[in-house]
Amino acid sequence: MSELAEHFRHESLAWLVERLVRRAESGKSLVSGILTLADADPAQRRAMDDLLGRRSTDGAALSVNLAQLASKLGLDEAAMLVLLGEVRGREVENLRARREGAAKSWSAIFEKWERHFAEDEVARVWLGALRGEGLLKRFAGGDLKMAEELLGRARRIFSGMPYPGVLLATIAAQSTGDSHALDRGKPLATLCFRYLCLRYGISSHSNAAARRDAWLAAGVTVDDLSAPVLCLNLPTLAGSALAPWIGWHVERGEPFYLPWRQLAHFEADPAMGEVFVCENPAVVSEAAARLGPDSRPLICMNGQPTLAVRALLRKLVDAGMTLQARADFDGAGLRILSTLGGAVEFMPWRMEVEDYFGGSGTRQLTGRPHQPSWAGELVEAMAERQIAVHEEDLIENLIKDLSW
């Protein structure tokens, strides 16, 4: 260690060293500017006077002109930086310059991948969001190489969309070599989910249902046994693959679940003509208990209609079925029917103003109800009455409609 470095290690000059290190790390000059120490003690003042070779000074505040200090020591910016490294026992780095360099490197990556995604407008929007939110950098742990790897894998997955009905684990294995790479919570899975939401107009609220719908929109099944559709007395075509199994339930008036895996094999029986659609499983339970095999065909959305529900309903409509659909008289119920209306045509089932007032609901309605195109008068009535009426409150009339 040099004699000058030894001198700077004196405890009375520790404040000066710390200030100079902070300036160096923030990218500020070490040979210009003024440093001031308030309430300097006599030892600190004497050490500074000795270092500058000046007569003793006094006063509460101690000021150091860095240009004079550099001149007295005969050091330029680079030499001052080396000196501080000697004093600290480790290299003093310009952290500001490092941050700026890293920022330029990340900008270069995004600019590069914008060119790779030149033909995919959705991907460019997606990439811009990742850049603005810092999500890619966080998922990559600040590692530029890892970031490139994630983007490359995502691009391979995007390029295959839409898929012809494959399992998510298969896509993960083919694109990454790891069948679990697209499991929920994995970085690549989250990045892809955000892209899917943009591409297919799906809610970006990350839950199991939204994730399942997002991948289904791309022709990928998260789990071909998940999100089954609850049905009652929904017959399939005689002689079709599912006829024995579904027929057993229809003959006995027993509800059954139709998983996505089996949905592809479902063939609608045109003889049913009209199919009813409800929001809550309680309606299916009541219809099965009271009517059994004498209930009309009934499908339950069980909340917001999943892609599986929508796919089944589209099959029915394409086969010539008429849909009668309803939900609760509340904000969520009207939003559900609005979503459904964007997927298939249906006739509102007991969703008129008189049906609303005929319900025995007592729950307070919160907020102004969502307004589907056909529900203007209904929304006004609900806003005025401020009472939510659920399907269970109308069960007698619903059961009457479901009776053959």
Image (cartoon, rainbow, N blue to C red):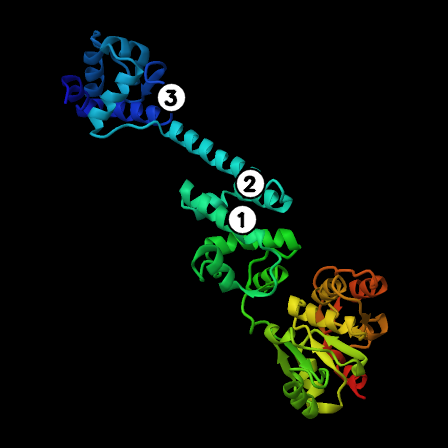
Q: Position of residue 93 (x, y in %)?
A: 31, 28
Kind of element beneath mark 2:
helix
Residue 331, can we see it? Answer: yes
Q: CA distance from mark 1 to mark 2?
A: 9 Å
Q: Earlier in the sequence, mark 1 or mark 2?
A: 2
Q: CA distance from mark 1 to mark 3?
A: 42 Å
Q: Is residue 387 left or right of residue 13?
A: right
Q: Quadrant of the C terminus?
A: bottom right
For the image, the number of numbered tags is 3
Which mark lies nearer to you, 2 or 3? 2
Q: Please, what is the three-letter code of the amino acid marked with disc 2?
A: His
Which residue is at a point 74% across and 66% down the rendered structure image? 337
Of residues 139 and 377, which is closer to you in this image? 139
Q: Position of residue 8 (x, y in %)?
A: 19, 21
Residue that mark 1 sits on: 155
Q: Please, what is the three-letter code of the amino acid marked with disc 3?
A: Lys
As drawn, 347 above or below 105? below
Kind of element beneath mark 3:
loop
Whether label 2 touches label 3, CB < 8 Å: no
Whether label 1 touches label 2, CB < 8 Å: yes
Residue that mark 2 sits on: 116
